[in-house]
């Protein structure tokens, strides 16, 4: 009996080792390289005091690297396009972006790990007070071009007009609001909260129009690494790692996504 127990333990250990090696084989340079949208604190950001990377993306990357027994790097990229391009080209092994069916043609997505609520920014004197006020004839709504909010609003708006902001620069958005080129600007609540805290004459309306599905991307067809990531996210949700990372980063309007089996795409 002891021999069988020992053999079973050795076999289990060998299987685990082979699984890890298979995952490592999908990380060709021996370092887990991750990217995130450089100006989206919902994913990750550099702490201005400690200069450490913080946020859910940072903690998920660290946990994944530890599981694989690899060193890691995590770098900000220029917008969604920059993150996707880094993964497609092989410059990064994984990236953090919001899920959208259009993007899924280029990369493979993990399950959703958090929902970043999106809302609208308006001038203080605007008559618009809620997300329910926005889809009206004659209203011009700004949004970052090719952002998840752009895709969602393109699918759902019936009356208002979208004005796209290439690159999603918030300074451009504020200028357009102040010159009355747009009536409101759509973006994630965290970014807008930070903006309002340091810019006078602006406010955020009540409510949210969309919980953007934050996820991890890998190169198309990289099923081994994707399976490791999905399993890690299952455990990170149960253990509280995702919730705690959101709290530690002080994020506003970011919720833990429901379990994988309850998600719909």
Image: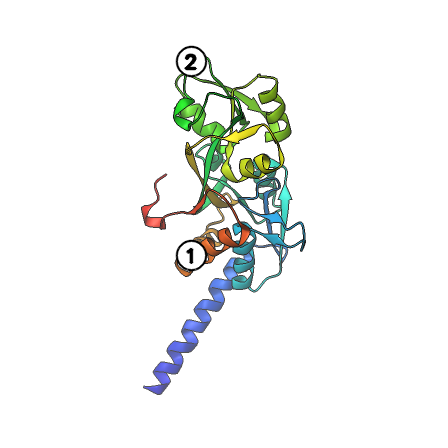
x, y percentage for residue 147? 52, 32
Residue 81 falls in image quadrant: top right
Q: Which of 113 and 221 is in front in this view?
A: 113
Q: How many circles with numbers are drawn on the protein?
A: 2
Q: Residue at x 54, y 56 (%)?
A: 59
Above or below residue 217? Residue 188 is above
- The residue shown at (55%, 38%) is 191
Q: In this view, does 123 lie above or below 213?
A: above
Q: Residues within 10 Å of mark 2 (few under 14, many from 20)?
A: few
Task: Name the residue rendered at 40%, 47% in the picture.
Answer: 257
Question: Which residue, as the protein is rendered here, is positioned at the far top?
Answer: 138
Rendered residue at 58%/55% (across/down): 27
- Of 186 and 97, nearer the camera is 186
Tell which circle, 2 or 1, labels the residue nearer the N-terminal end: 2
Instruction: Residue under label 2, please give it.
Output: 137
Residue identifier under label 1: 231
**Residue 211 spot, x, y in % from top left:** 42, 38
């Amino acid at each position: 009996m002891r021999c069988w127990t020992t053999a079973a333990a050795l076999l289990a250990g060998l299987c685990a080792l082979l699984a890890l090696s298979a995952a490592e084989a999908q990380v060709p340079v021996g370092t887990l390289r991750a990217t995130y949208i450089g100006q989206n604190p919902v994913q990750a950001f550099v702490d201005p005091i400690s200069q450490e990377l913080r946020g859910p993306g940072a903690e998920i990357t660290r946990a994944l690297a530890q599981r694989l027994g690899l060193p890691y790097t995590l770098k900000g990229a220029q917008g969604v396009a920059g993150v996707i391009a880094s993964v497609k080209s092989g410059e990064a092994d994984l990236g953090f972006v919001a899920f959208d069916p259009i993007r899924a043609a280029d990369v493979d997505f993990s399950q959703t790990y958090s929902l970043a609520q999106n809302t609208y920014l308006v001038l203080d004197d605007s008559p618009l007070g809620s997300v329910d006020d926005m889809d009206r004839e004659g209203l011009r709504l700004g949004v970052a071009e090719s952002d998840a909010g752009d895709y969602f609003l393109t699918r759902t708006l019936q009356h208002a007009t979208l004005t796209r902001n290439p690159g999603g620069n918030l300074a451009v958005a504020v200028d357009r609001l102040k010159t009355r080129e747009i009536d409101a600007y759509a973006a994630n609540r965290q970014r807008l909260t930070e903006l309002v805290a340091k810019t006078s004459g602006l406010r955020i309306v009540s409510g949210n129009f969309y919980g953007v599905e934050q996820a991890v991307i890998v190169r198309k067809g990289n099923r081994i690494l994707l399976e490791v990531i999905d399993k890690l996210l299952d455990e990170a949700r149960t253990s509280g790692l995702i919730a705690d990372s959101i709290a530690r980063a002080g994020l506003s309007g970011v919720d833990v996504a429901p379990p994988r089996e309850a998600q719909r795409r």
